[in-house]
Image (tube, grey):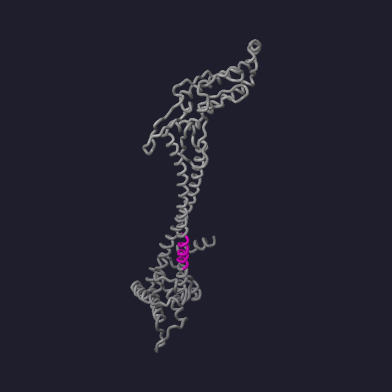
Amino acid sequence: MRDPAEIRSLPIDIAFARLQEWLVDRKRVPQDRRKRLAAIRSRLAAAFSSLPRDLDPYLQTLELEEIGYLEAKKIYSILLESNTDSRNIFGRLTGSAGEWESIVKAYEKDHVFLGEAAQIMVQNVNYDIPYQRKQMQKTQQQLAELDRREADIKRLAALSATRYAEACQELGLQGAVEQPVEESGNGFGSYEIIDANIELAGSENYGVGASAYPSADKEGLTCDTSENQICWDISTDNPEESATVENAPTESGQYECLTEERSQLLEKEYRNNILDDLLEVKSFLILRSAEMRNADTSSLQHQVQAVSPFVLQQYAPERLENMLVEVSSAISLLTNQKTLDLIMILNSKRFLERLVSTLEEKKHHEVKLREGLGDLSVKRMELQNALSSSWPKQEAAIAKTRELKKLCEATLSSMFDSRPVHIIGEINNLLSSSVSQLAG
């Protein structure tokens, strides 16, 4: 037979999942505990409405739904220490202190508070605390998603700004996009374009000029047969050389007489003729340079060079290479996308409107992305506020659960001759995980 002292040292383990049933089966709480708790809650509501909350800061933080046995006991101790209420002839407290004293005694009668404590612990462990944790995890995930979206938007905004700047740079624009105004003559507004006066040569060996300005030679391209220039044999006796726009209607319905000298480069046929000649010259220079550098025909080249005119003798292979570079540069200038776009701007109003619309769309896309960053900031602040408010609630629920567990274990231990009582199960996993989170 075991010693009674040894028996008193044996712990009593109570499974948390069956705590309420265990208390009822062993008659540690009355069968009608729910009915009694409902009556106590009614008395709590009446007493709370007349509670002098200015006596202590703790009373100002309380809400009716949060008050249980532990809170009622603390309220009673605060009112008792304040000495604002007197006792009757039987020595009982009157006023608010008397009301809360009767509430505490109602809780302690037949250990009704144990039933309430078990009910609150089950609610917190199985429902409230896991829900709060899931909400906090969801909020943290949303914050991480906002950070990712913010990084993406900033990247796209920078990319959009780069594309907008590149598009403006291709057209020679500086700063904001403004629709160019077509002025008289060959003006391109805010755009820079190579006009009919294209410098194809510019070296001391040869040069070609094509002018369509009103102040230029209106008789056409002259053929300079000097030794330092190439004659293209191009005549500008073209009825489409100039265009005169008369009686053009204005937006107000009035008519104005506008005389405009159009650059011949705006005409596709004229550009094609120049391009054909340039390509022909380029092919000739390539072939001629290859022949002059070919060792197999060098003796023949020397013989031909000796009897050729002086104007041909002065062109060495190196000078032909320089000519080839300049002709290739002229071809590139005539055929690059910037030149073609700017020609289309003057030839087609629809193209101009579409081009301006495209540039504005690129600019507005960046602005729209930047505005989206402001919306993300507002959303982030809302989530951070929600996270900040959820954390204290979770910690308060965990602290109350821990306190109620200690209360139940201490009370049950006093019922079993001070034998240690342990409530085991998932409640300990939850409380230990909260401790590890705080330590982390």
Instruction: Indicate yes or no whether the magenta region holds residue 396.
Output: yes
The spot of residue 129 in percent (x, y) is: 44, 62
Instruction: Provide the residue span drawn in magenta.
Output: 387-399
* Residue 207 visible from this viewpoint: yes
Q: Nearer the viewer, residue 60 or 295?
A: 295
Is 206 displayed left or right of 336 in the figure? Answer: right
Q: Quadrant of residue 360?
A: top left
The spot of residue 169 in percent (x, y) is: 52, 37
The spot of residue 119 in percent (x, y) is: 39, 68
Tell me the quadrant of the picture where the C terminus can be found.
bottom right
Q: Residue at (44%, 79%) from the top-left corner?
A: 79
* Residue 425 visible from this viewpoint: no
359 relative to 14, above or below? above
Instruction: Indicate yes or no whether the magenta region holds residue 102.
Output: no
Q: Nearer the viewer, residue 117 or 94?
A: 94
Q: Main secondary structure of the magenta part?
A: helix
85 relative to 345, above or below? below
Q: Nearer the viewer, residue 130 or 60?
A: 60
341 relative to 416, above or below? above
Q: Residue at (42%, 37%) from the top-left corner?
A: 353
Q: Nearer the viewer, residue 400 or 237?
A: 237
The spot of residue 106 in percent (x, y) is: 38, 78
